[in-house]
Image (tube, rainbow, N blue to C red):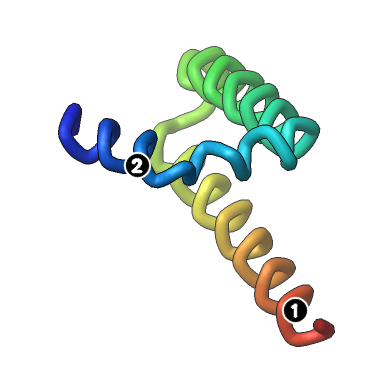
């Protein structure tokens, strides 16, 4: 992983993060909030239902991503 990270850094690929800071921070915040809420929900909701909910969220996200890419 360290070698891959070093190569990625040297290629200048991290410059994308500079241009897309709002997107990066939004996705980071969403991931943290989702992980916290998912962890808290484990005490109230069966893990099988959480997996189904996560799968639904991912399918909706994929659908929206592909719809967006078709429009452009």
SS category of the residue bearing label 2:
helix
Please tell me how crowded label 1 is: few (under 14), some (14-19), or many (20+) other residues with Cα within 10 Å. few
- Which residue is labeled 1 in the image? 67
Distance from label 1 to label 2 (Cα)?
29 Å
SS category of the residue bearing label 1:
helix
Q: Tell whether 12 sits left or right of 61.
A: left
Q: Is residue 57 placed above or below 67 in the rendered structure?
A: above
Of mark 1 and mark 2, the one earlier in the sequence is 2
Of residue 47 and residue 33, the one placed in the foreground of this image is 33
Residue at left 74%, top 86%? Answer: 70
Of residue 70 and residue 21, the one placed in the foreground of this image is 21
Marking on residue 17: none
Please tell me how crowded label 2 is: few (under 14), some (14-19), or many (20+) other residues with Cα within 10 Å. few
Q: Nearer the viewer, mark 1 or mark 2?
A: 2
Residue at left 34%, top 41%? Answer: 8
- Which residue is labeled 2 in the image? 8
Q: Where is residue 46 in the image (x, y as percent from the top left)?
A: 44, 31
Q: Position of residue 40 (x, y in %)?
A: 55, 13
Residue at left 47%, top 42%? Answer: 12
Name the quadrant containing residue 19.
Answer: top right
């Amino acid at each position: 992983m360290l070698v891959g990270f070093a190569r990625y850094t040297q290629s200048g690929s991290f410059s994308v993060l500079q241009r897309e800071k709002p997107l990066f921070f939004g996705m980071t915040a969403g991931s943290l909030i989702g992980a916290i809420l998912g962890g808290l929900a484990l005490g109230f909701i069966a893990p099988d239902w959480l997996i189904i909910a996560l799968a639904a969220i991912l399918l909706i996200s994929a659908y929206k991503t592909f719809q967006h890419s078709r429009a452009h």
